[in-house]
Image (cartoon, rainbow, N blue to C red):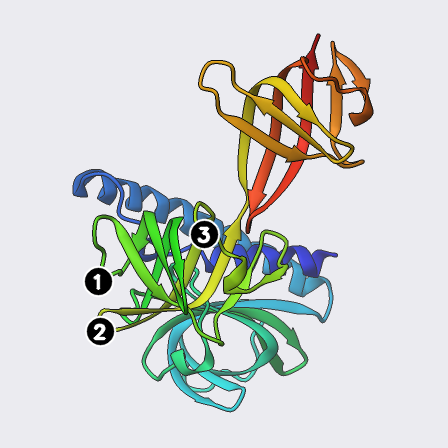
Amino acid sequence: MKKSIIAFSIAALVFTASPAFAGNRGNESDAGKADFYKSERKQDQIKLLDRKLEKYNDDDNRSAFLIRGTIVSLSGNTLVVASTKLSGNIPNVTNGQITMTLASDARLKDSNKNQLTLADLTVGKSVMVSGTINGTVLTANTVMVEGVHQNRFMVKGTVASVGTGSLVVTATKSENVPNMTNNQATVVVNASTKITGDKNDNFTLSNIMAGDQVIVHGTVTGTTLTATNINLKSVKKVAYGKVTAKTDTSVTITNTVTGTSQTVPVSTDTKVTINGETKTATDIAVGDSGWVKFKTRAGVIVTKIINLFR
């Protein structure tokens, strides 16, 4: 249990410990102050983790490690890093260099949490590595490459349209997007693009619809954006009004002010209350008034709560 907690703490620090990882918010002066104080706090956290690691390593033969340095070489799954900072009882440090084995499921990220591949772990890049020690063998579970990667992008926002092999996203947040037009980015989607939902369920481009919320990561070639990962986010909505229609599997609620109607599905998982009492969908009647909470993703509506009065 202690080992799992420490490994989790290390992984968290790998993504937050350096001020270089912080976004640019506010004016430069305020951002500088914020980064300074963040850096101070993170350095204190690293020192605390160092002490925990030392105590943990004294308790038994198992240990965890945290290394910060530059990549010397990568051959197959063997990574060599010249360390500038390290924590844990690390064996076989030769001339400041540490050799470790990348776990088959090692998480490779950049400072913006974009997913990387082994090809991104090139000689000379600054990295933070965390993992476990078993005897003289170091296994790296997380590798984060520091700094800005000009060949990668991120865009978060609402899908404006879906085409054949592409989609257009109206951005609320973006990084390194060279071809933004009217706050919209066109992204190429190919067979290698991984499309997932909130619970890591898999989708295809045909599941994505205009209005869906997405976070897209990928590569930049010139002005072309190619998605490597698309995450479909659920959009929570509320509809207010009067029940104007119902079936065994759906309810339609119409806003009497705007005239807008919303039909939502009902299931055994839908929580129904009428006049404050717990009911079922069969108790709903045309003419009841109230509101419906539901969420949409990939064109699918899931109704969570129906609260009505009569």
Q: Distance of mark 1 from mark 3, alpha carbons?
A: 19 Å
Q: Distance of mark 2 from mark 1, alpha carbons?
A: 8 Å
Quadrant including the C terminus:
top right
Vertical placement of 18 versus 93: above or below? above
Q: Where is residue 302 in the image (x, y as percent from the top left)?
A: 65, 40
Mark sitting earlier along the chain (2/1): 1
Q: Name the residue under label 2.
A: 222
**Crowd rating for badge 2 (residues with CA inside 10 Å; few <14, some 14–19, many 20+):** few
Q: Mark 1 points at which residue?
A: 178
Quadrant of res 57: bottom right
Asked whether residue 151 is in view, the answer is yes
Residue at 56% in and 47% down: 297
**Crowd rating for badge 3 (residues with CA inside 10 Å; few <14, some 14–19, many 20+):** many
Q: Which mark is residue 214?
A: 3
Quadrant including the N terminus:
bottom right
Residue contact between numbered discs 2 and 1, judged by CB atoms under 8 Å: yes
Left or right, residue 303 beside residue 1: left
Left or right, residue 133 beside residue 157: right
Residue at 44% in and 54% down: 215
